[in-house]
Image (spheres, helix red, strand yellow):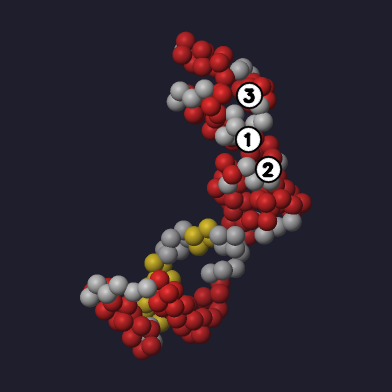
């Protein structure tokens, strides 16, 4: 039996997949063994290599794995239905402060706008637009509680004017930012 090679992975989230298994097992061939030995030699001897060489060494490893274990390797990049919903929310959360349009978020999710909206609403029982507005207001509240004023926040959170920000804040929390702060200090 051939010895195994373990590749450490992180929880990787991309537009295609989520990999949560911390290790991938592959049978170690003579070629892979020599490859690993070469990498270890570079590290042990403290040899500095160019970014181009690092890229090509990674490319070589990927090609070896694809050739020797095509089904196992390619399965890593196939979407898993139970992870697609989390992916949508991750895309929104990771781009929350970028003020991207829903079309841009759908593009990042590799979906049409209508599919993105439908899938998001199905998964979270809220439209992506409403989720973004409410989430931004929650983040703004946190900064407000840390001492920032509404006039310092409204532009960062995508509001065109201070009055629009105050109106949205009051709609969500039932009072203006000033009233919220005075109430929280009194309590």
Residue shown at 68%/56% (left/top)? Answer: 107
14 relative to 100, above or below:
below
Where residue 147 sits: x, y (%)? 45, 23
Neighbour class for label 1 at 10 Å: few (<14), some, many (≥20)?
some
Picture disc at residue 162: 3
Q: Earlier in the sequence, mark 2 or mark 1?
A: 2
Front-most of residues 16 and 106: 106
* Local SS, label 3: helix
Picture disc at residue 158: 1
Residue 168 visible to an observer of this rendering: no
Residue shown at 48%/85% (left/top)? Answer: 68
Residue shown at 55%/29% (left/top)? Answer: 153
59 relative to 90, above or below:
below
Give the label, 2 or 3, closer to the camera: 3
Judging by the rendered image, the residue that carries numbered circle 2 is 128
Residue 102 visible to an observer of this rendering: yes
Front-most of residues 148 and 86: 148
* Local SS, label 1: loop
Q: Earlier in the sequence, mark 2 or mark 3?
A: 2
Neighbour class for label 3 at 10 Å: few (<14), some, many (≥20)?
some
Distance of label 1 from label 3 (alpha carbons)? 10 Å
Neighbour class for label 2 at 10 Å: few (<14), some, many (≥20)?
many
Where residue 171 sits: x, y (%)? 67, 23
Please give left or right for residue 59 compared with residue 118 in the image.
left
């Amino acid at each position: 039996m051939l010895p195994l090679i373990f590749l450490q992975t992180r929880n990787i989230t991309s537009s295609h997949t989520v990999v949560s298994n911390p290790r991938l097992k592959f049978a170690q061939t003579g070629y892979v063994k020599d490859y690993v030995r070469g990498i270890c030699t570079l590290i042990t001897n403290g040899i500095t290599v160019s970014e181009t060489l690092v890229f090509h060494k990674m490319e070589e490893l990927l090609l070896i794995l694809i050739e020797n274990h095509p089904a196992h390797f390619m399965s890593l990049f196939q979407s898993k239905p139970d992870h697609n919903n989390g992916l949508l929310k991750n895309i929104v959360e990771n781009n929350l402060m970028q003020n991207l349009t829903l079309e841009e978020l759908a593009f990042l999710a590799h979906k049409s706008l209508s599919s993105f909206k439908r899938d998001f609403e199905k998964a979270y029982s809220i439209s992506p637009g409403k989720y973004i507005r409410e989430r931004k207001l929650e983040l703004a509240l946190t900064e407000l509680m840390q001492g920032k004023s509404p006039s310092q926040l409204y532009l960062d959170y995508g509001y065109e004017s201070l009055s629009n920000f105050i109106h949205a804040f009051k709609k969500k929390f039932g009072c203006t930012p000033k009233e919220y702060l005075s109430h929280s200090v009194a309590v």
